[in-house]
Amino acid sequence: MESLRPRRLTEFLGVLWKRRKLFFLMALMMLTATLIAIHRIPNLYESSALVVVNLRNDSQGFDDPARFTTLHQELLSRATLTTLIRKYDLYPKAKNMEEAIESLQKALKVETKLRSYTPQSPESVQISHRYNEPKTAQAVVADLVKIFEQGNEQIKVEAVAEAERLTRQIVEVEDRLRQIGPRRDFDMFRFEALARSRGDSTSALNQRQAVASSIETLTDKEYTLQRQIAEQRNLIAEQEKAVKAAPVTPGSAAYGTLLAERSRVEAEIKNYADQYTDKHPKMIQLRNQLSEINRQISRMETQTGPSLPMALTPEGRDLLAMQRELRRMEAELDLTQRQLQRRNLEISAMPAGAASMAGMAGVAPASSEKPPGGSSNDYAARTEYDRLVIRYNWLLEKQDSMLKLSGAQGPSHMMFFAVDPPNLPKLPVAPNRLILHLIALAVSIIFGLFIALASEAPRMFMINDHRDIEYYLGAPVLALIPETLTPFERARRRKLRMTRGLVILTLAAALTPILVVLFSYLRIFQIIGNK
């Protein structure tokens, strides 16, 4: 036979109904194997912890970012993972330590959250671990959090030692400040009085210099404006000649503009005629506008340029713009002259000796001036006092920072603080058994359909009924002769059917554990369920 007879859907359904026992047996066998493989997948429990990171912006203190980076690398190092695997006997079915470390890296999740503002330093660390025993998962996360706690202890020891050293320095600075404090206060009182008197003279000098500089700027601006006004007047004179020499004719641009405007107004009147009456305000306005345009067009057709408004020609519009610019320049010149006059009055009203007094005050900078009547020792003591005050404030800030790191103000102020300690999970997070059961049911139905259709496939190439005879031979079937069997043949067929059924049952029973082992080895359902 060169080709198969095309079959309809009802014929395929008939084949399934004929092979229904085989379909249900194969589907049941596959469903049993997949369910056993699914239930052999261990539950995964997830334990997590949240550690807050308090990094300081102290450039003179410990290198906090580098310390955090070191601890983070230690957290995920092979030495740490190997220690956890051996301590809790993780992944006993792994072939070697490399495979166990790879499995732990997949089950371990460390997320570092950065701040949303500048500088984007680490804000918190989320640690989570999945394992088939909840207590073991909690213990692994607890050991990882201990790495940060050990870092806190090391920072605490260093901070306590640094705080003691700073305390000794603060005591020394306080003793020295008590020794030179009273003398410095008396000298500084006299020095500040002198600086205040000289500051007044310097202020007068600065004010006089500012007014003089303003007068120079206004003078330059006045001269510039006068030149620009003269040039603008020359341009206006030339433009007036061009306006007088260019008559407006009916073929000019202004004439064409009026014609286009008249066409537009007439079109609007025609459009609004269907909507409004002649007494409507809109219609009255449009008709008045049209009459005005017609009047200007009639005047342009009978008269020439000099008797028409300048705005109707391009030359006239340019002349008007140049005249407006001239008026603006003249107004700006008048304002500049008024300001210049006021500045001259101000500088004439200032005292004549202000400059000389300010010059005397500016002989030496105020920061380097020694107080009157003070010796060089007093000046050195005052300078040392100012330096010690700055150092004293810096030492207090540094000591406060060290006290925070040492835990004196509570554990929440230390560099690492576990906000959420490792929890003991009660419910598994994986696998998703509902999804796996639905997948197993679908796989079983597909497998049963495949086996039923495969068992019937050889018969599709044979002549089985009258439809095959009509298709392949092209002869109509007039009658069907029923098959007649002897008692011996019936018994033999029944025995053959029973034997075939027992063989299929045995094959299904033997195939079930094989499929279970296959699914468990390939870990198909475990991979799907853990996603």
Image (tube, rainbow, N blue to C red):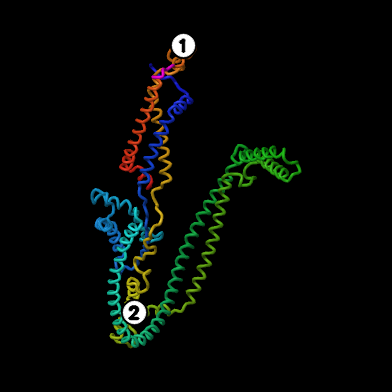
Q: Main secondary structure of the magenta part?
A: loop
The alpha-carbon separation of the residues under discs 2 and 1 comes to 121 Å
| Number of numbered discs overlaid on the protein picture | 2
The residue at the point 27 percent across, 59 percent down is 74
Spot occupied by residue 231 in the image (x, y as percentages of width and height): 50, 54
- Determine whether the residue tagged by mark 1 lies in a helix, strand or loop: loop
Query: Crowdedness of circle 1 by 10 Å Cα count: few (<14), some, many (20+)?
Result: few
Give the quadrant of residue 16.
top left
**Circle nearer the viewer, 2 or 1:** 1
- Rendered position, 11 above or below 149: above
Spot occupied by residue 118 in the image (x, y as percentages of width and height): 39, 61
- Rendered position, 117 above or below 411: above
- Determine whether the residue tagged by mark 2 lies in a helix, strand or loop: helix
Spot occupied by residue 212 in the image (x, y as percentages of width and height): 44, 70
* In the image, farthest residue toward the front: 487
* In the image, farthest residue toward the left: 96
Query: Crowdedness of circle 2 by 10 Å Cα count: few (<14), some, many (20+)?
Result: some
Quadrant where the N terminus is found in the figure: top left
Residue kind at label 1, given as amino acid type? Ala
Q: Which residue is mark 1?
A: 475
- Rendered position, 268 above or below 373: above
The magenta segment: 484-488
Spot occupied by residue 394 in the image (x, y as percentages of width and height): 33, 75
The answer to which of 343 and 386 lies nearer the viewer is: 386
Residue 389 is labelled as 2
Give the quadrant of residue 220.
bottom left
Residue kind at label 2, given as amino acid type? Val
Whichever of callouts 2 and 1 sits on the residue coming sooner in the sequence is: 2
